[in-house]
Amino acid sequence: MDNIKTLDLANEIEGKLYGPNIELKGNFTFLNKASKDDIVIRHWINEKGIEIAHDKGVSCLITQNPQDNTIHVAEELDFPLIVTEHIEYATAYALRYSVNKYAKDSFKMAVTGTNGKSTTTHLLFTIFSDLNYNTYTNTDAESEGNTLIDPRVSYELTDFYNSKGNIEVIALEVSEVQGWDEKLMKDHSYQMISAAQCDVAVITNASFDHMNLVESFDELLYEIEGAARALNNQDKKTLLVLNYEDENIRNMNSAVKDNSNVKVMYFGDYNSENQLDISYRENVGIYSKEELYIEYKDLPFTSAHFIQDIMAAIAVCEYNSLNKEDVINSLKNYKPLARRFIKLRENPVIIDDFAHNPSGIKLTIENGSKLGNRLIVVNAIRGSRGDSINEEIAQALSDTLKDQNDYTLILTCSKDVVNHLNTVLDSELEIFRDCLDKQKIEYILMDELEDALLESYRLADDEDVILLLGAQGMDPASGILSKNNII
């Protein structure tokens, strides 16, 4: 915060300053984590929050939604309050500040896309950590830290540096689309990757998701392509890794075609006539150009989406000339994030997967159906995410299940486990059911997740497969199964 004042910061983030123009010190953080002189970023704040910040000695608070008498209280206390219409500008500023202060010379990687970004980020974090690099990542099983809504990454970089020392590598998961209350936070991936000053951007794929925030698939693609455009802001050699099998992603090379600083690498299916940088040959392994990099038997998982994530990670490893044997050893021992095609039980097989959009649903069913005889799918409807995404998911279920010889589909609204932010709305349930009915897909509907899980287990024989699909509405599934002595 060298010599920046509150008025300067307000101008930087297109905000308005209420209160004194003072010089800022401290770090960007949350209100509950703040110490004297820190700068708090909070999406909304009320007068009580201002009083708490003032009592803590916070030097400034930034918000988008001041409630009730917040501004008046701040002025009475002579406390610096900045109000901006774009809280993401503040968190992006905070991220850039923290990177410059605590990780300026680190190697910074960002991963975005509709599916696979959490696993790819975690793979990279694991590999670099196993190779003894002091590596920070923001990814976790819930993928809650991959946005510019709050200053989590900025705060965690500060905390990481203070507790673990010099940051050598950053593996950053970045939400491809972000927003709230049906309003798009424009250019999210572009802003976050630009602020982090990334050396690498990986784009995994693009499929229908977040359609309550964007007006069309083309707008979704533009938001995802922001990861590529962000590399044009870096005055250094950078890498763009693209999924060759996704035509929309493959064509995003056009965003950097005039930038000689950006190297583009592709991953995809093996083709002897069109050798990609990284490719997969079925039942043989993953190749780097024409050389077999890792054999099929050494892959930690062999489902299609995991293989794509591994290829993307290997591309970054090759770009960095990491020791091949060390990378292979790391991959052999890799343990995935929770709810990423995790096998919870044998006989019957129970697979838990964070399949929350159409392409994720399709891939998980196709891979899971190979693991046993009859297929039982338990799908948690996405609550408060809009009619469009639920219609797309229902269509994906219909399209995929109609090719299965023997299946049972159980839907749940997960009323026993979700909060008000994830409650299935009447319109969402109606459009989900209408889509399945039109396709003549039979299903069982159960209000509560626990009832749905117990019913799936009751229906299953030892040779069958139970797939647990969905986002927040399915997150507690493993705990419920454990409570009932099923796993």
Image (cartoon, rainbow, N blue to C red):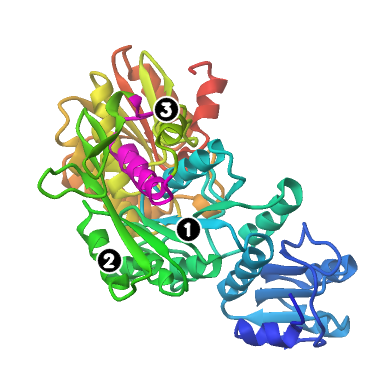
Q: Dot 2 corresponds to which residue?
A: 253
Residue at horizontal 54%, vertical 21%?
482
Residue at horizontal 82%, vertical 68%?
53
Tag 3 secondary structure: helix
Disc with the residue nearer the chain's start (1 vs 2): 1
Percent position (x, y) of residue 109? 48, 56
Measured in 3D between alpha carbons, the distance from the residue under mark 1 to the one under mark 3, in whole angstroms, is 26 Å
Residue type at numbered disc 1:
Val
Identify which residue, 456 or 349, lies in the foreground: 349
Measured in 3D between alpha carbons, the distance from the residue under mark 1 to the one under mark 2, in whole angstroms, is 19 Å
Q: Is 125 contained in the magenta span? A: no
Q: Dot 3 corresponds to which residue?
A: 332
Identify which residue, 388 or 283, lies in the foreground: 283
Q: Quadrant of the N terminus?
A: bottom right
Question: How many numbered markers are drawn?
Answer: 3
Tag 1 secondary structure: loop
Residue at horizontal 20%, vertical 39%?
400
Percent position (x, y) of residue 382? 41, 49
Measured in 3D between alpha carbons, the distance from the residue under mark 2 to the one under mark 3, in whole angstroms, is 31 Å
Q: Dot 1 corresponds to which residue?
A: 174
- Asked whether, in this view, residue 89 is left or right of residue 221, the answer is right
Crowd band around label 2 with a 10 angstrom C-alpha radius: few (<14), some (14–19), many (20+): many
From where the camera sits, is residue 453 visible?
yes
Crowd band around label 3 with a 10 angstrom C-alpha radius: few (<14), some (14–19), many (20+): some
Q: Is 315 contained in the magenta span? A: yes
From where the camera sits, is residue 69 visible?
no
Disc with the residue nearer the chain's start (1 vs 3): 1
The boundaries of the magenta stretch are 298-321
